[in-house]
Amino acid sequence: MSPISNGQDRQLTVGIDIGSANITCAVGSVIPDSNRVKLLGIGLTPSRGFRKGSIIHRNQLIEQLEKALLEAETMANTKVNNAILSVTGDHIRCLNTQAAVALNRNRTNGFPGDRTIIETDIDQVLNLAQAISLPPDRDILHTLPQEYLVDTLQEISNPVGLTGRRLEGRVHLVTAAASAMKNLVECVEELGIKVDGLVFQPLASATATLKDDEMQLGVTLVEIGASTTNIAVYHGGAVRHSAVLPIGAASLTNDIAVMLQISIEEAENIKIKYASAKASLSSPKLEFDLPAENSELSRSISEHELSRYVEARMQEIFQLVINEISRADIKESLTYGMVLTGGGAQLRNISVLAGDLLDMRIRIGTPNYIDGTADVADLPIHATAMGLMLWPIRADDYTQSSHISIKTFFQKLIQPIKDFF
Ligand SMILES: Nc1ncnc2c1ncn2[C@@H]1O[C@H](COP(=O)(O)OP(=O)(O)OP(=O)(O)O)[C@@H](O)[C@H]1O
Ligand SMILES: [Mg+2]
């Protein structure tokens, strides 16, 4: 094996997506003067010691992390020093807040009057909007500007240069358990990797898969992982609501294992090979044999019957997703409906089922803005890892109303974690 170069000559960007089923490490280089990344290497390993966004066995997790990292480093022929991590779990909460500052005091003479808005005013508004009272074990993970209001003018994405007496900022805040973030960062740092930032999973997937038009006119990103389903609702170019449901595609496997009395591993293989999210699209005549021990009689089941269990569970998941979308409290309809990512989005006919249930446009989200070995990256299951790589260069695109540069943005989101060290 050739020695690993340290990649100093390129601007590397690395994403590590730690899930309950899979760990994906993606190494890319930023393509100069573009908002795109060239994929150099990808490492994939089954995950161990991690469930529903929490570490349940630290050493097992570190072992698997190291494998994924080494695989990606070898493929990219470079050493990884820094990375951005995904974060999810039912400890994550979101809320919309707002804050306002008075502009009607002229700085030179102290008299009331209109004043032109400058960057510092925006920083001040965003800082105030973040000043919510949080329990001691929680920290702000993201502060995503939604819109600004200058006096009676609304829906302003960038108020710099406008004149007024009052500037209001509305933001979407994502908060997370400090200990969950700290533990995750420490696992990765144990491998000598400096963590540059943590990104809430659906925001990373959205960065890789959504187009600006979709975020503007309204879309819900639904990332169906193994043990979690992550949701981000976009409208007006910004996040309006986000949530984590503690259920995912592994529930389908469990259901199949229980119903057919087979092992989880066998059920997983059967799910991937034969299951469909829409039972009516699977033939009752197409039967397959179930795994049997030597002494057992051979059994068979139709794809249609198998898919009935799967459809019932997926309906339940989509019902929970609908409940979350209604919490977004958006008056206009979401023109672009829903984009599905994550391993669960690879289930056969899932978009047909979602379309029937939700009566909206549905598409499967495959990562965009990635060059190079795009066929490897071109799957919904890799959307989060690709989004993490793209985050430093594209995140300020989808939060185009933001005036926090990506550097200070990262400083802000990593600061609460550093405070613990
Ligand atoms: N073709 C397929 N059909 C059905 N399910 C699939 C398919 N491919 C992958 N999956 C399911 O996707 C899940 C893995 O997806 P993913 O890697 O996104 O999860 P994860 O990120 O590890 O989990 P989480 O984010 O919830 O912790 C598994 O439950 C797997 O069974
Ligand atoms: Mg995941």
Image (cartoon, rainbow, N blue to C red):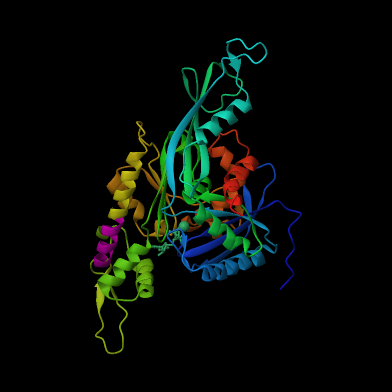
- Residue 117, horizontal then vertical, whole percent: 60, 21
Instruction: Answer above or below: position of 59 versus 281.
Output: below
Looking at this view, is 305 or 236 the one in front? 236
Name the quadrant containing residue 67: bottom right
- Is residue 324 in sight in this rendering? yes
Name which residue lies at 49% across and 44% down: 210
Outermost residue, right side: 9
Left or right: residue 266 compared with residue 201: left
Instruction: Answer above or below: position of 297 versus 22.
Output: below
Name which residue lies at 34% across and 48% down: 321
Quarter of the image with the C terminus is bottom right
Name which residue lies at 39% across and 45% down: 338
Instruction: Answer above or below: position of 97 versus 78.
Output: above
171 inside magenta stretch:
no
- Is residue 401 in sight in this rendering? no
Q: How many marks?
A: 0
Residue interval drawn in magenta = 304-314
Looking at this view, is 144 or 177 the one in front? 177
Name which residue lies at 61% across and 10% down: 111
